[in-house]
Amino acid sequence: MGNNHTSNIEMREKIRNGLNLAFKKMVNYKSKNDGYLVFSENGKIIKVKAKDIKL
């Protein structure tokens, strides 16, 4: 059981790292093309210029 738990933690870390990398690549791509990212905060839609996002 301990080995399976370790493997789950490692898998979660790999997934988290992959999502962080994908987000950084998306922000860089959108910045180069003067694009926006759209988020939802408390049910409100927010547009943020990609160049304004600090990584």
Image (cartoon, rainbow, N blue to C red):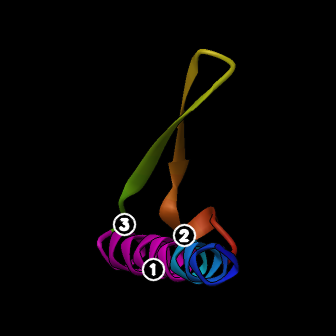
> Cα distance, mark 2 to mark 1?
22 Å
Q: Secondary structure at mark 3?
A: loop
Residue at 63%, 66% in the rendered image: 53
Task: Give the side of residue 17 with respect to residue 25, left or right.
Answer: right
**Which residue is depicted at the point 51% across and 55% down?**
49
2 and 1 marks in contact (CB < 8 Å):
no
Q: Nearer the viewer, mark 1 or mark 3?
A: 1
Is the residue 40 above or below the residue 10 in the image?
A: above
User: Residue 51 shows which numbered tag?
Assistant: 2
Residue at 45% across / 79% down in the picture?
18
Q: Which mark is residue 47?
A: none
Give the extent of the magenta segment: 14-33
Q: Residue furthest top?
A: 43
Q: How many marks?
A: 3
Characterize the magenta stretch by its predominant secondary structure. Answer: helix
Residue bearing mark 3: 34
- Amino acid type at circle 1 is Gly
Is residue 29 part of the magenta span, yes or no? Answer: yes
Residue assigned mark 1? 18
